[in-house]
Image: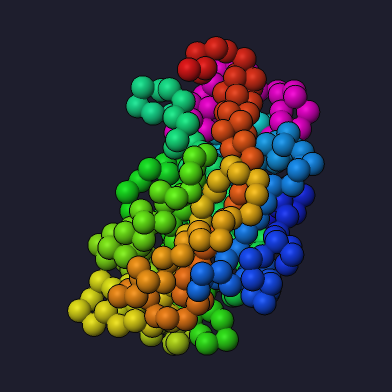
Amino acid sequence: MKDFPTLNNWFRFLDESELYDITKGIDNWYYEHNECSFFTLLWKGDADKNSFVKEFIKLISRLRWKYEIEVEEWKKIDFSEEFINYINTWSCSLTEEQKQDYIDSIMSHWMRNKEWKFDLESTRGHIWEILYYLLRQQYLKDEHIHINPDVPKRYSKEPWLDFTEIRKDEGGFYLIIWEVKTTKNSIWAYPDKIINQLNENHKTTFLEHNSFYKDKLESWLIQNSDLEDFILNLPNFSSISSVNFKSDKKRFTWVVNYWKNTKHTKTVFWGFKSNTQATLADEIKCRNVKLIWIKDIDDIVKMIYKTIFFWFLKIKRWIK
């Protein structure tokens, strides 16, 4: 992630003049809207789509190689660097067999279905989950402590929570429960869907995340006593215990990627607070909405796909 250029090369933040209520001004990228904390990025009209695709493909290669390499012989050759060299120079020293093996074993799992065909929906989801990690790295407001999973999931359709994260602000540690959605269609179907997922589903699916943080305690990876106490009380913050008290230590964040290059409407997410009253505390900081409004999402997805699976391999069996 650290090698990816700043997203400001392709995106811009809303100006104060674009806000519906200018008194809610932007503070460290955030502003208040419908009793929520909003963060909105818009694709720049003159942004270079090709350069974005190029950098994103290189990032995917680095991530997949680092966390999925299993073949001992491959450690002798950094196939990822060879692939990145191809993206930079359009030349590659790997043999055709090595290239095919690299694609089949490392790069294909997150964008193909069981029939070995291009799965646009899961590919789009995976790409924009990666984008979320970039957002939180480049525009992190508070101190990052831990995140689960450490890197974007291989398959975006996995049923459990997308992410949980422990951060720290002036009030101490707090828990974020994340849900990421990507659509090229209307945004209006998403608020109710995500509210239900965050309000209800996390009560059961959070158990795996709770175990992740507890394992860090048991492995002596955490020495901070305040953080240890916070992790021991995570079941309360996540609504999976009988205590189930509301606290500003628990916060929901929705990330919605959308391909309309304009600001959001005045009523978007107007029901976030009312529909989470039984789950969240009243403070605005407990309800966060991150909108990434990007034009031609599917064009970008297909450009990424074709560069990896067609131009690199130069064979047609990868084209659906």
Depth check, front residue: 102 or 78: 102
Where does the image place residue 122, in percent across and percent down from the top left?
44, 37
Residue 110 left/right relative to 13: left
Where does the image place residue 100, in percent across and percent down from the top left?
54, 21
Instruction: Please give the range of residues in magenta.
Output: 84-110
Which colour style is shown? rainbow
Residue at 32 percent across and 59 percent down: it is 196
Where does the image place residue 167, in percent across and percent down from the top left?
52, 74
Where does the image place residue 49, in percent across and percent down from the top left?
72, 36
Depth check, front residue: 278 or 178: 278
Residue at 60 percent across and 19 percent down: it is 310
Residue 218 left/right relative to 166: left
Count of marks overlaid on the render: 0
Residue at 58 percent across and 55 percent down: it is 264
| The magenta stretch spans residue 245 | no
Q: Quadrant of residue 17?
A: bottom right
Q: Main secondary structure of the magenta part?
A: helix
Determine if residue 177 is in view.
no
Residue at 25 percent across and 71 percent down: it is 240
Q: For the view shown, which residue lies furthest in the left direction?
A: 242
Determine if residue 309 is in view.
yes
Q: For the view shown, which residue lies furthest in the top direction?
A: 316
Residue 73 left/right relative to 217: right
Q: Is residue 248 above or below residue 135?
A: below
Depth check, front residue: 118 or 64: 118
| The magenta stretch spans residue 103 | yes
